[in-house]
Amino acid sequence: MFQNIADDVKQEEYEDVKELNKKSKIKRLFGIQNIILYAISFMLSMVSFGTELAPFGLAIFVATCSNKIPSGIVFIVAGIGTFIKFGSSGLLMYILTVLVFIALVLIFRPKYEYTQRNEKQKLGKYILIATLLVNIVKMFFTMFLIYDLLTAIMLSVTTYIFYKIFSNSIIIIKEFGIKQAFSIEEVMGAALMLSIAFSSLKDLTVFSLSITNILSIMLVLFLGWKNGMLVGGTAGITIGMVLGIITSSSPILVAAYAFSRNGCRYTK
């Protein structure tokens, strides 16, 4: 009889621990860092180079997979942003690319895990191949043009590049307030990621002033204030070039962002 009572107590304790672990997982899933990441993923998925190259939603999804961050919600919010910005055809391409990517990972499993690095698993080649395959298959259902092939190659390479940037900078959002110091590469990558996300607000203005430019210049000034003029100037040039390409702005935008780092010298 006492053995049965002891077994019942152990079973109740096990159920309580299981319930606590479940609540803890849900709490972590909707923690402040993850909510910020979901918002950034949504904004990134609505940004493109011109009208055809939209690599950022795919890049941030694979970056979360590489960092072993729960990527299901990132996949959903990035899909919603893709649908809002690019319609059903863009959403279809996004879903197909993710499915091909998952199939490649399951068939050719990553062999190495780098526990001491931000990029826990090297998934770049998988998303590059998946993006290229989906866009090449698409050509068989339309008129084949060399331009389309070059665009597919460019999209694949661009997705790979920004995957590498996001996977090495997403730790700042993940461990903000926990980790005391970050490397210059992580800070620069996070700044670039935020500036690209801000560019989704390019159609919003306040008193004829672009919200994107205001937030991005504030970001450059903050980097220069916290990390010095070198980081501020480098971030200004990098952000200015990328935003200039995305928003099709004049080259003077690069000079404006680079010049803004000089303000850091006097505000520090």
Image (cartoon, rainbow, N blue to C red):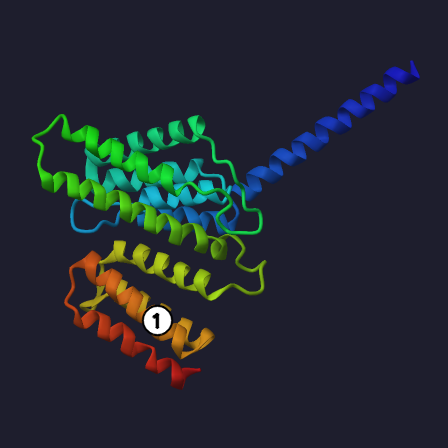
- Furthest residue in direction bottom, as rendered: 266
Q: Quadrant of the C terminus?
A: bottom left
Q: Residue at x 57, y 47 (%)?
A: 115
Q: Position of residue 176 (x, y in %)?
A: 52, 58
Q: Position of residue 134 (x, y in %)?
A: 25, 31
- Would residue 160 be visible to someone looking at this image? yes
Give the residue at mark 1: 234
Q: Position of residue 186 (x, y in %)?
A: 45, 60
**179, above or below 131, in the image:** below
Per the image, label 1 sits on a secondary structure element best described as helix
| Mark 1 Cα shell of 10 Å, populated few (<14), some (14-19), many (≥20) | some
Closer to the camera, 228 or 1?
A: 228
**149, above or below 209, in the image:** above
Q: Amino acid at mark 1?
A: Thr
Q: Residue 96 falls in which quadrant of the image?
A: top left
Q: Residue at x 32, y 60 (%)?
A: 195
- Furthest residue in direction right, as rendered: 2
- Would residue 203 be visible to someone looking at this image? no
